[in-house]
Each structure stands twice: as structure tokens, then as C-alpha cells.
Amino acid sequence: MASIVFPDNSSREIEQGTTGLDVALSISKGLAKKAVVFEFNNRLMDMNESIPGDGRMRIITSDDPESLEIVRHSCAHLMAAAVLELYPDTKFGVGPAIENGFYYDMDIPGFKGEKDLEAVRSRMKRLIKKNVKFQKKVISYDEALSLFSQRGERFKLELLDEIKDSGEEITVYTLGGFTDLCRGPHVPSTKFLSSFELLSVAGAYWRGSEHNEMLTRIYGAAFNTREELSTHLTFLEEARKRDHRKLGAELELYSSKGMGGAGFVYWLPKGTIVKENLENLWKDAHRRAGYQLVSTPHIAPVELWKTSGHYDYYRDNMYFTEVENGEYAIKPMNCPGHIIIYKNSKRSYKELPMRIAELGTVYRFERSGALHGLMRVRGFTVDDGHIFCTADQIVSEIQDVVRFALYFLKMFDFGYRIELSLMDPADPGHYAGDPADWARVEPLLAQALDDMGENYKTVTGEAAFYGPKIDIKLRDALGRYWQGPTVQFDFNIPGRFDLSYVGPDGDEHRVYMVHRALFGSVERFIGNLIEHFTGNFPGWLSPVQLVILPITSAQNEFAEKVYKEAVGAGLRCEFDTRSETIGYRIRSAETGKVPYMFVIGEREVESGAVAVRRHGEGDIGTLTLEDAVQTVVDACARPALPERR
RNA sequence: GCCGACGUGGCUCAGCUGGUAGAGCAGCGCAUUCGUAAUGCGCAGGUCAUCGGUUCGACUCCGAUCGUCGGCUCCA
């Protein structure tokens, strides 16, 4: 006999050998039907496992969000089982649950790619119909060794070795004809897995290292209900509709094709308006926030990059050019240029903190497969800033930068999440400088965030080569996260360039340096904006803010007066007198995502008014010319600048 | 870079098992003067990504290169 306690603190006595399912059944049939796994003394177990003794028990059903991970992981097994039926020579890697679904990495001889997915899908459905059970078995290392070597499962053998070293119990799960090395737990049977969809096929290196063999990865989505699955598939569809590459072409914002070179952005006139307005606000905001704006060249002698360390740590990503009197590098970062500006004269402690900033266009060689629309390019503009300060000023300067970054994110209603990126102590060769310095400085960044009351996640191994950093990920309207503002501490480069200031004591001291970017890359930030707003930019960024639409050419004269009025008020306005129906021209402005339209017919001419139409909403009523223009002017007003410092 | 898929006029796509290309939208012209998301007719536009190969003949088959897409790796 054993005694178990439920979450509501009720308890019951059970006989030895009683399984989780037995307990669930004794409570209610309904519960047993949807029980996925149970938690016993904080350990998740399969429903058909016997309860090992006294303890606390909680049954997790398909109504609990926690069950999703189990369902997804089990679905990976289900897919593997289906693949094995179709391709008996398949060798299996790993198949974990991921956000919204799962994947399995496999070497599948004979697999033809996406066109073969349908066959896998229908095999999976067949297994679901048969309601096949998951069977767990604890086996010895030798049994496992013989099982997997017999099948030539080279990847599993590798994993097995590691489990052996860890001393963990070795368990395998069998689903139909597929037995997998797996810690579990799993759903009782395949009927829990009916809400899945296979999404895509991709290559993935074994264990994530490009030195290893490349396996075939099949991605799938899985949920507890059809509804959740269909909501997710709709979400994916929505994301496709918002894709900045698609909208960027439709709205004529930029071009990056043809002989322009892969990974290079050509801003079209409309995109340039967006970019320029964003940059102008950025410049004004920076001046207000106490930054001095500077401008530095795109190319510099290679010696500069040797001194900065980029030549050693970043060369693979740099473009070089050679001329008669030596080798030059095209700048991949703006910091060395800003250092030259700092070093232009002897600096006093009275000048610190010295904040300089530049919209600096940089070029980095990116491997072809990494390129992606505006998000990942080879030439882009960093909204770069460098703060030179004393040790005492570091924390407050970092806090100011974080606040400044949030000013921009809030302006666009982006959510955010903060990450503190530290060095990987296991890989010191990847970083410049003395590990002891890193250890001294990393807590300062944490302190800056703690004092502000900001939550953050610490990630090791994500630091820049010259120092630890704070990354702010922005969350867009679809809940997706993107790389956003970054604040990077640097205690390396100042030493390399011998950067100093004269203190009140008359001695020279080493200056500290903070690198920071708020948009990150202007290109990518605009890509984010396009997707976040589905191309419906806030008025102040809209390439065209207003279209004047006379219903017939009889209204052209008055409409032109309206047009001149709007242009005079500073609006970016178009006058559409094309010989098309009013319906056609309205549609044209709507698909162009122009925020406002003034429709002018006979009635409006007579009363000297305009019918105002708002993008996406339709006719919002007739206003006097003056009020109408003012309405649009107000809607297109630039956001307020930050506090002057 | 790696794995897989794809690459036909500005855009979206047809083009069967090889016999030298079609549509809609956009553009241009003419007509139309219209009340809140597509008026009609006509015209023009493509060495079928590029370069090789197989073939009497290739958009269709093969190879390489370039580019794009989904991922991996990397990353602002």
C-alpha cells in the first residue's frame, strides 16, 4: 500500500502496481480519457507507469498547457515512426518539441523532399487511427548498445555514450515498429496526436555544428485541438501576408534584386521617405539626448582594423580593397572611426561622458544562405553611438541608453524582452581581453538593469568579442521577437587605442566605452516596422499621406486648390486625376496603404468642403477644407522628442 | 557556406511525355466623366536567370554558375 496526495490535498491509499491511469480511472472516466501524463513528486511519468510509492500526484490532461510539450514531443516520435515505415533505412538524430510544434532530424535515404511529405502525413494519420500505444522500457547500456548498433543508428549510439557517462537510466520508447532512445514521458497513445500538420523540410547539421553531417529535418506543428492548430496555421498565413519582402515590393519601398548584388538594398523613392523620416527623428532625438553627431568614412587603412582587433576577430566578415599604397578595409563597424574622433584631442574628465553618434553605413560579408530581405543584408546602416565615460558613469549611462531605447520601442508600440549576454567561460579564445576584466564588468550591466527594475534573461556565450552586452528583443504585433536595441560594454578597444582622459588629479586614466544601437540596423528596423504595421506606417512615416480624388474632371479646379492647401500644410500629397472611375482610384489609394483620401464631388465643390476617407475604415464624413487638412496634419504629426538633457 | 526546393514579360501565374511562348494585373493610347476597393477597347512588353552539354531541334533533359525561398550555421 502507498499513500498519494492530490493537488487539493485530498489523499488516497493505493495498492502496489497501481498505474497513473488506474488512479485517473478511479476518479472519473472523463479524466482518464484526457489524461496525458502525471506528475509524481515533481517528476513527469507516463500514465501507464506504476506509482512508485508515497507522494504527491497531479494528473496533467490535454486541457493543461503543460501537456503541449508532451504532445509535440510524442508527435515527433509519431512522425519518425511514419518515416521509418516509408524509408526503412532511415537513421535518426534528435526529435524535440519546439515552440508550436516539433521537428525530427534524420538521415532518410531516398527521401525526395517536400513532395514526399504528403506520404509521411498520411502514414501518421493511419497510425493515429490505429491508436497505437507508446511503450516505455528501461534497458541496460549493453541492451541499448546492441539494439542501436544492430540498426546502425550511429547518431543514437553517440547519444547513448553520453547518457552512459552521465549515469542516467536508459529508457526506450516503442511506437509501432519504431523504438527510440528517449527520456519521455509520452502521451498514452497516438489518439492524442490528431491535431498536427507537417510544415517544411530543411537541412540541419547533426548537433548543430557545421563540421558535422547534414541531416534532413522535418518541421511540424502540433496542438491539443484542431482549433488551436488552425489558429496557428492562420497565424502563419498572416505572417506571410505581412512579409516585408512582399510588402516592400508591392509598396515600392526597396529593391534588392538583379545586378545590384545579393544582400544590398536599393531604396526606392517611397522607401527613402520612410527611411529619411525615421533617420531625421533619430538625429533630432539624439541631439536632445546629449549626443554629438559625427560622420566617418566608409573605408580605412587595414592598420586601423588591426589595432581595433577587427582584423583578428572579424576578418571573415570584412570586405577588403587594395590600392597602390596599401590595403584598405570597408568598415564593418563604426567604432574605430568614432575612436579616431575621440582621440582628436586630449580629453578632460569635464568632457565625460562624451556621447557621439552616427548613422553609419557598414558592410559585412554574410554567407549567401544567411541573407533575408531587409533583415539580414550585406550593407546596412547602424544607428551607432559610442559613449566614452569614467568607471563611475557606466551604470547610469547604460541606464540612460536603455531608457532611450525604450522611448523608440514605445513610439511604435513594440513590446520587448531584455537579454544580458555574457561570455562563454568555456571558450575564452573567442573573446578579446583578460577574463578577469570580464568577470569584473559583467555584474555592472546586471546592476544597471536591476536598479531600473527591468526583468532580463542571462545568456552565456552571446557576448561580443570585445565585451558583454544587453540586447533588447522587440516583440511585434504578431508576438514575434526580433533583435532590436543593443548596448555593448567595451573594456578592450580603449586599451588597444590607448584611449584616456585627464582626471581632476592631473593624471591620465583609461576611458571606458559603451557601444550602442537603438534600431540596430535601420534596414532591419524598417523591415520590422513593415511587418508590425502590415505596411500601414504611422502617418509621419507614410510615403504618401494623402490623395486628392476629384470624382470627375469637373472638380479638378477646386481639387487642385485643395491639393495646394495640403501641400502648403506640409503634407506628402498626391493629386489623382487619372481618367478612371472614382472606385478604381479609391481602390488604388487603398491598396497603396495611403492613410487619408479627400474625395471631391459636385457637393463638396459647392460647399467648399471635402469628404474624408480613412484607409481601412472608409468614408469618415465631410469636413471643411481647413478642418480636413488639420485632421491629416494632426494624424501625421511626428512623435514628441525625448526630454532635453 | 551547407541541405532541400524553386527561377517564364514590372507583378501573379499557364505552358501535356522536347517541335523556337500565353493569360490576368501593372504600363501606354483612345474612348468614358463616373459618389467611396477594379469602365471598355486597343497597343506594347519575354535571347523562358546565365553559361555549357545532349539532340535534327530545349522553356521543357543533364551539368555548372548566379539568384530567391524554407531551414542549419552565423548574425545588426
Image: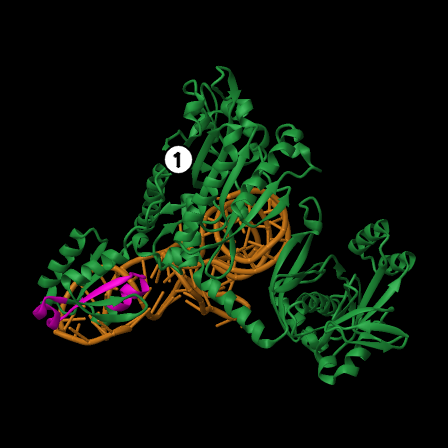
Chain colours: A green, B orange
Residue ranking furthest to the bottom: A29
Quadrant where the image shows the N terminus of chain A? bottom right
- Asked whether A596 falls inside the magenta stretch, the response is yes
- Relative to A550, residue B73 above or below: above
Quadrant where the image shows the C terminus of chain A? top left
Q: Which residues are magenta?
A: A586-609
- Relative to A317, residue A610 above or below: below
Residue ranking furthest to the front: A9
Instruction: Depth check: give the residue in front, B1 or A217.
Output: A217
- Asked whether A10 falls inside the magenta stretch, the response is no
Left or right of A608 in this view: A451: right
- The location of residue A578, given as percent across then percent down, is 19, 64
- The location of residue A277, given as percent across then percent down, is 32, 47
Element marked by disc 1: strand
Crowding near pointer 1: few (<14 within 10 Å), some, many (20+)? many
Dot 1 falls on which chain?
A: A
Q: Is residue A467 visible?
A: yes
- The location of residue A322, given as percent across then percent down, is 47, 25
Answer with the quarter of the image where residue B55 lies.
Answer: bottom right
Answer with the quarter of the image where residue A218 lies.
Answer: bottom right
Instruction: Depth check: give the residue in front, A231 or A300.
Output: A231
Residue at the disc numbered 1: A358
Q: Is residue A519 visible?
A: no
Answer with the quarter of the image where residue A317 lies.
Answer: top right
- The location of residue A428, given as percent across then percent down, is 68, 33
Left or right of A540 in this view: A610: left
Residue ranking furthest to the top: A506
Q: Count all numbered tags in the image, as a single digit.
A: 1
Three-letter residue code for mark 1: Glu
- Residue at left offset 72%, top offset 60%: A109
- Relative to A275, residue A414 above or below: below
